[in-house]
């Protein structure tokens, strides 16, 4: 059951995007959204490689603490406003309601994701900015270390009423794809339409798209199978998702190691780099 959604945030301008997507799912599933502000440590705000005497270092640390406190107060105000705007109740959870909690933890987002994510049903993260080396470590921590499914949200994208109502499932018979299917069953079951997208090189001895459709049918889910062709499976998968009119793509993540995909440009990395729609991934 989708009941606990983790939303780690920092002051990077992506708060509204990730919270909006988390809220949309929480309202559909009466879930709890746990927002964790990843607070920068004061010592990390001091310039590295600059020689400072004891007094100067003390003053800079005090200023860093004050700045971090102001950032925390400002962000908390934004989060409370957005939670109300997105229809989330704040406070104690009641049966049949979607609620939002706010906590603050010191440290890097990737480290917080590692331990806070393990008891979450879903982790919501902004789309990584590979060119700025931003967000990749958090995505890797969520998929590999926390071992939880991740909803990746592109910048400035806000979900509308169609979000997750038509779900496309990328299928190649692989283990990551199977885990993505298992991790998204609640979301897929709640959708009004489900499309299984299959094409490119299928996993040797892996289940077929017809097998997946039968798996869904046992759970009361009717799914259509859509074939796609092309030399670039990642591009074709994204294009076909748009062509069938889906508002959410479910896909397996990183059949190879994350580092190999980064270096060689594997299918998962190309999907993450090029998507302009939300994607739920699992490894």
Image: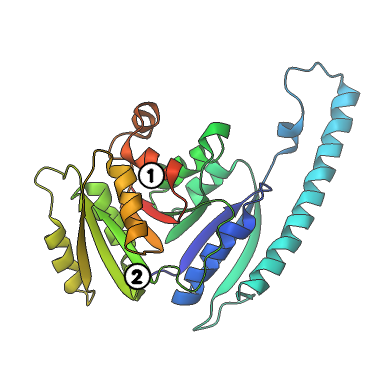
Residue drawn at the location 28% of the way across and 68% of the way down: 194
Assess disc 2: are there few (<14), some (14-19) or many (≥20) residues with their C-alpha within 10 Å of its C-alpha.
some
Query: How far across and how far down the image is residue 27, in percent?
Result: 50, 75
What secondary structure is marked by label 2?
A: helix
Q: Is residue 163 left or right of residue 41?
A: left
Q: Is residue 60 visible?
A: yes
Q: Nearer the viewer, residue 190 or 146?
A: 190
In the displayed structure, 269 sits above or below 98; it is: above
Q: Is residue 87 left or right of residue 28?
A: right
Q: Which residue is mark 2?
A: 186
In the displayed structure, 29 sits above or below 199; it is: below
Assess disc 1: are there few (<14), some (14-19) or many (≥20) residues with their C-alpha within 10 Å of its C-alpha.
many
Residue drawn at the location 26% of the way across and 64% of the way down: 195
Q: Is residue 120 visible?
A: no
Residue 135, labelled with which disc?
A: none
Query: How far across and how far down the image is residue 244, in percent?
Result: 32, 63
Query: How far across and how far down the image is residue 78, in percent?
Result: 72, 61
What secondary structure is marked by label 1?
A: helix
Residue drawn at the location 29% of the way across and 35% of the way down: 256
Q: Is residue 39 left or right of residue 117?
A: right
Residue 271, labelled with which disc?
A: 1
Q: Nearer the viewer, residue 186 or 128?
A: 128
Lower position in the chain sequence, tag 2 or tag 1: 2
């Amino acid at each position: 059951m989708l009941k606990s959604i983790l939303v780690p945030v920092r002051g990077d301008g992506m708060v509204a995007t990730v919270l909006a997507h988390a809220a949309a799912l929480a309202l559909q599933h009466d879930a709890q959204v746990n927002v964790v502000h990843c607070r920068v440590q004061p010592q990390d705000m001091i310039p590295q490689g600059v020689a400072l005497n004891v007094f100067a270092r003390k003053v800079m640390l005090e200023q860093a603490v004050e700045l971090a406190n102001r950032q925390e107060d400002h962000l908390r105000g934004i989060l409370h406003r957005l939670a109300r705007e997105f229809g989330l109740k704040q406070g104690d959870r009641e049966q049949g309601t979607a609620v939002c909690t706010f906590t603050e933890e010191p440290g890097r987002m990737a480290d917080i994701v590692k331990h806070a994510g393990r008891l979450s049903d879903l982790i919501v993260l902004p789309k990584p900015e590979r060119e700025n080396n931003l967000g990749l470590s958090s995505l890797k921590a969520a998929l590999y270390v926390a071992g939880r499914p991740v909803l990746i949200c592109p910048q400035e994208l806000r979900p509308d009423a169609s979000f997750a109502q038509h779900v496309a499932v990328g299928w190649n018979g692989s283990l990551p794809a199977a885990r993505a299917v298992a991790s998204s069953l609640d979301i897929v079951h709640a959708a009004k339409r489900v499309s299984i997208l299959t094409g490119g090189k299928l996993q040797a001895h892996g289940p077929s798209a017809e097998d997946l459709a039968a798996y869904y049918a046992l759970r009361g889910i009717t799914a259509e199978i859509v074939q796609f062709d092309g030399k670039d499976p990642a591009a074709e998968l994204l294009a076909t998702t748009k062509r069938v009119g889906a508002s959410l793509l479910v896909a397996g993540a990183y059949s190879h190691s994350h580092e190999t995909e980064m270096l060689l440009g594997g299918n998962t990395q190309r999907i993450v780099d090029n998507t302009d729609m939300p994607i739920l991934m699992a490894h």
